[in-house]
Amino acid sequence: MIPRALTVAGSDSGGGAGIQADLKTMLALGVHGMSVITVVTAQNTLGVRGAWELPAEAVRAQYRAVVDDIGVQAVKTGMLSSAELVETVAELISGTQAPAVVDPVGVSKHGDPLLAASALDSVRTKLLPAATVATPNLDEVTQLTGVRVESEGDLRRAAAAVLAYGPRWVLIKGGHLAGDAVDLLTDGSEEHWLRAPRHGNRHTHGTGCTLASAVASGLAKGLPVPEAVAEAKEYVTGAIAAGFPLGAGIGPVDHGWRFRN
C-alpha cells in the first residue's frame, strides 16, 4: 500500500505554505497526503490578511475520520494558533501509533504572528513531548526557550533547550544564519549536521512547512529519522533553488522542481 501521511495545519489561500505546501510535498515524494485543516487564512505573497480558527471539534472530527478509516504512517503538525487547538492535536497524535513531526509555527515568512502567546506553554508541555521530531527555526527556538542563536556554535545549546521539553529528536533549522544553510539534527547523544549552499533566491515562502512535511513523508516510507531528514533537506534545497516569482511579494518554493528537471 502507498505510504500515507497526514498534515494537521492551516490553509494558505496563496498555495505557498500550510496544507497546500504539505500536500504538494507529499505527492512529490511518493506519499499519499491527507489533511486536517486547523485555520483558514486569507493570504498572498504580501502577507496574511486574516485568519479564522476552526472549532476543536471540527479538527478532532477530521483527524478521526482519516485515522480511523485510512490510517496513517506519519503525522505532521503546523499552524495550530491557540492553546485549545495545540492541546487537542497533542492529545490526538499522542494516541496515534505513528511518528509525529511537529513544526512549532509561530510567525509567517512575512512576520505575521500565527500562534497566540497564551499557547506557548501548551506547545512546550503538551505538543513537544508528543513529537518524534521537532523542527523549529531560530525565531521559534527563541520564542519557545529564550535561547538566541547568533552563530553555528549556538545550535547545540538551542537543540538542548528544545530537547528539554521532550521531543525524541530536534532539527534546529539554521537557515537564518549567514553563510551556508546549516541545520543540526540531534537526539541529545547522536548528532547529524546538514549543510547546503545558500541560494540567492528570495522566493522562499513555505520552506518550513515543506521541510517538515518532507520529513514526515520519509518517516511514512519507513526511513529512520536521520535518513528522512537528509532526504527532506535535499528536497527543500532544490525547491528553494527553483522558487519562482508570483504576485508582488515573496513567492513560493517550487514543490515540483524534480518533475521539471
Image: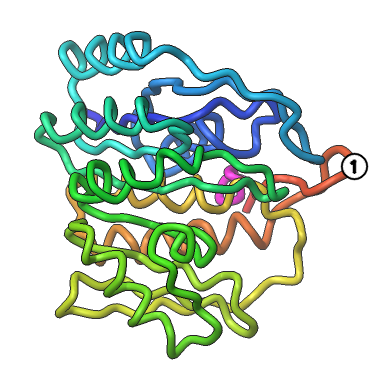
Q: On the image, which quarter does residue 150 sit in?
A: bottom right
Q: Is residue 151 left or right of residue 48?
A: left
Q: Nearer the viewer, residue 4 or 111?
A: 111
Query: Can you name the residue that lies furthest to the right here?
Result: 248
Above or below residue 193? Residue 131 is: above
Give left or right: position of 246 versus 192. right
Residues in magenta, as a range: 255-259
Query: 256 or 86, which lies in front?
Result: 86
State the residue position of label 1: 248
Query: Is 133 placed above or below 221 here?
Result: below
Evaluate whether residue 217 shows in this view. Answer: no
For the residue carrying disc 1, how many other residues have a C-alpha within 10 Å: few (<14), some (14-19), or many (20+)?
few
Residue 153, image x, y percentages: 43, 90
Residue at x 48%, y 41% (from the top left corner): 25
SS assignment for the magenta stretch, majority: helix
* Quarter of the image that includes the N terminus: top left
Q: Residue at x 28, y 29 (%)?
A: 89
Q: Position of residue 83 (x, y in %)?
A: 37, 32
Image quadrant containing the C terminus: bottom right
* Color encoding of the figure: rainbow
> What amino acid type should be assigned to the residue bearing mark 1?
Ala
Residue 255: x %, y % from top left:
58, 44
Q: Which residue is rendered at x = 29% and y = 78% of the image? A: 192
Q: Is residue 132 magenta?
A: no
